[in-house]
Image (spheres, rainbow, N blue to C red):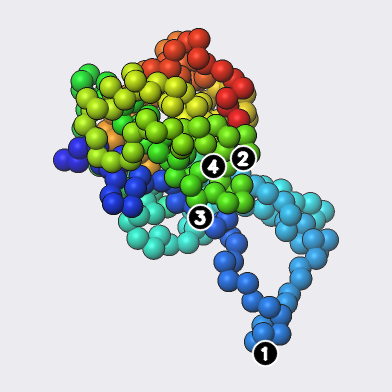
Amino acid sequence: MRTGNDFFSRGPAGPRIPQLEVEVGANPVQVEVGEFDEAIEVVEDAAENPCLNHRCKKGKVCEVDDTNTPMCVCQDPSSCPAAEGEFEHICGNDNKTYDSSCHFFATKCALEGTKKGHKLHLDYIGSCKLIEPCLDNELTEFPLRMRDWLKNVLVTLYARDEDNNLLTEKQKLRVKKIYENEKRLEAGDHSLDLLARDFQKNYNMYIFPVHWQFGQLDQHPADGYLTHSELAPLRAPLIPMEHCTTRFFEECDADKDKYIALEEWAACFGIKEQDVDKDLVI
């Protein structure tokens, strides 16, 4: 059984941070026309292919009708590329393992408009497995590690950011104060007691990271509330390693309305009500 510290563990290189990936579909190797005799530049006319600039949500693909008008239709799961390995597997909340996110969203699209389709959500990344129940004492430990991890993610991004590609100018100004603070707890494998004491002593260092993560998730739309789908980028990779993830986010929704407001999110991480500030969600 993996312990709750697995996701937030750190090696000599510092805290684990989200991998910065090339945009899906982008070719990281740019080949100059004429560099190779075989390289031929092909420019597709959007007028000939209306789907060229037509975007569809996950699970759907673009097709043209009889009038050459682009429209989004459900993708056939059998048309999804074969998974390259188990790392691409997805576990749905129906406790079924899907070969990839493509297979999952295509299946969900096919069920659109049905009760089963409405209830089907991506649960976590990886094959379905037994997730141990989260005990009360373990639940209280979760935000201690998560707060420390968020702070160190921001500090690492700040240290690596030269061209404002990782953080905006406003974000960098906020993180700079944390980065340069001599009292900052350096990244490491700290005990829960030390994390709790540091939060009490250096409380102000944790306020912005908690707000920042909320802003990173609140995107579709940015309305001051987190939905199940907006939480997915954080919770889906977290669940297999942190078995308290689901219970933690469920209990964050204090009024049980299926939305997590900024005030509820902040309270979950121990941020005082008077320190909740929508202007910090940059």
Q: CA distance from mark 3 to mark 1?
A: 30 Å
The x and y percentages for residue 76 are 53, 53
The residue drawn where x is 21% and y is 31% is 191
Number of the front mark, 2 or 3: 2
Q: Which residue is mark 2?
A: 168
The x and y percentages for residue 119 are 45, 29
The residue drawn where x is 38% and y is 42% is 237
Number of the front mark, 3 or 4: 3
Q: CA distance from mark 2 to mark 3?
A: 18 Å
How many badges with numbers are in the image?
Answer: 4
Q: Secondary structure at mark 4?
A: helix
Q: Is residue 166 visible?
A: yes
Q: Which residue is mark 1?
A: 37
Relative height, residue 40 to residue 263 (above, below): below
Q: Of the residues shown, which amino acid type is indicated by label 4?
A: Cys
Image quarter in which the N terminus is found: top left
Mark number displayed over residue 109: 4
Q: Of the residues shown, which amino acid type is indicated by label 3?
A: Glu
Mark number displayed over residue 145: none
Q: Secondary structure at mark 3?
A: loop
Relative height, residue 185 to residue 140 (above, below): below
Q: Of the residues shown, which amino acid type is indicated by label 1?
A: Asp
Q: Is residue 130 visible?
A: no
Q: Of the residues shown, which amino acid type is indicated by label 2?
A: Thr
Q: Point out the tag, 3 or 1, that comes first from the N-terminus.
A: 3
Q: Which residue is mark 3?
A: 21
Do callouts 3 and 1 mark residues in contact (Cβ within 8 Å)?
no
Residue farthest toward the left in the current orientation of the protein: 1
Q: Point out the tag, 4 or 1, that comes first from the N-terminus.
A: 1
The x and y percentages for residue 215 are 55, 30
Q: Quadrant of residue 202?
A: top left
Q: CA distance from mark 3 to mark 4?
A: 26 Å
